[in-house]
Amino acid sequence: MFKPASLTEVSKLILSSPNKSCELDPIPTFLLKSCLHTLIVPITKIINSSLSSAVFPSHFKHAQIIPLLNDLNSYRPIYNLSFISKVL
């Protein structure tokens, strides 16, 4: 069983993350960080709900796939996930 995440833990994790964003993010990471004081409670509730129910939300399972050319005969896929799915 997982211990519920605190507001402080989630806040520290988000603020220490790089500002990289993906097309799947509803808002860019830098903007999320600047509005974190308003969004930290619902984000923490989503995380704790997922941990307590042992269910990863299906909309967080979507990824943007980009093929990366390793050599002339093979491609390596790169999966870009939304920022909140990475935090979770």
Image (cartoon, grey):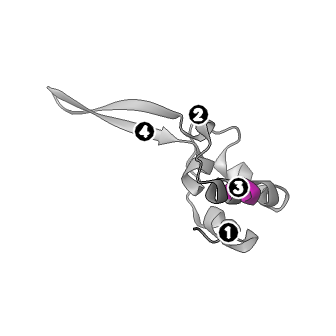
Instruction: Name the kind of residue labelled 2 in the image.
Output: Glu
Work out how far the residue at label 1 is from the one at label 2, CA to CA, in angstroms: 27 Å
Marking on residue 5? 1
Instruction: Name the kind of residue labelled 4 in the image.
Output: Tyr
Which of marks 2 and 4 precedes in the sequence? Answer: 2
Residue bearing mark 2: 23
Which range of residues does the magenta coloring cover?
Answer: 43-47
Give residue 74's quadrant in the image.
top left
Q: Residue at x 68, y 69 (%)?
A: 4
Q: Secondary structure at mark 4?
A: strand
Give percent across and percent down for residue 11. 70, 67
Marking on residue 49? 3
20 displayed left or right of 4: left
Circles 1 and 3: CB distance less than 8 Å? Answer: no
The image quadrant where one finds the C terminus is: bottom right
Q: Residues within 10 Å of mark 4 (few under 14, many from 20)?
A: few
Circles 4 and 2: CB distance less than 8 Å? Answer: no
Residue bearing mark 4: 79
Q: Residues within 10 Å of mark 2 (few under 14, many from 20)?
A: few
